[in-house]
Amino acid sequence: MLALAAEVLTHLAEPTRLRLIRLLAEGERDVATLTGQVRASRSSVSQHLGRLRLAGLVRSRRDGRRMLYQVTSANLVALADQAVRHAEHLVDELPAHHRHSSV
């Protein structure tokens, strides 16, 4: 069980994938829409989505020519949100000259 939990965390340990999970929490999206919302190329977004899909963290369905993606679990969304909130807490504790705006 712990190994599986660690594997899920490994997939979320990349900022673009974490951002994608949080965006997909808002509803289904296609690659073009997601590419416009993250700082990554279309190719990179597709690769991240593929990795998340293979891990079972997102699922896809075809809608005409588009492939739509959605998260597979509200628990996953809660985990991603908790990680971001925890990071925000850590940043708030840092002296101003050590803070980064990428959180």
Image (cartoon, rainbow, N blue to C red):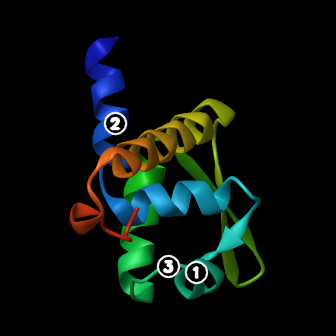
Residue 98 percent across, percent down from the top left:
21, 62
Q: Amino acid at mark 2?
A: Leu
Q: Left or right: where does residue 79 sit relative to residue 13?
A: right
| Residue displayed at 52% across by 37% down | 82
Query: In the rendered structure, which disc, 1 or 2, sits on the residue that comes first in sequence?
Result: 2
- Does residue 63 lie above or below 72 as drawn? below
Reading the image, the residue beneath label 3 is 38
| Residue displayed at 45% across by 87% down | 42
Q: Are marks 3 and 1 in contact (CB under 8 Å)?
A: yes
Reading the image, the residue beneath label 1 is 37
For the N terminus, the image quarter is top left
Instruction: Label 3: state its secondary structure.
Output: loop
Say which quarter of the image contains residue 69. bottom right
What label does residue 27 carry, if any?
Answer: none
Q: Amino acid at mark 1?
A: Gln
Reading the image, the residue beneath label 2 is 9
Q: Left or right: where does residue 28 sit relative to residue 95?
A: right
- Does residue 44 lie above or below 26 as drawn? below
Residues at marks 3 and 1, CA–CA distance in whole angstroms = 4 Å
Q: Nearer the viewer, residue 20 or 42?
A: 20
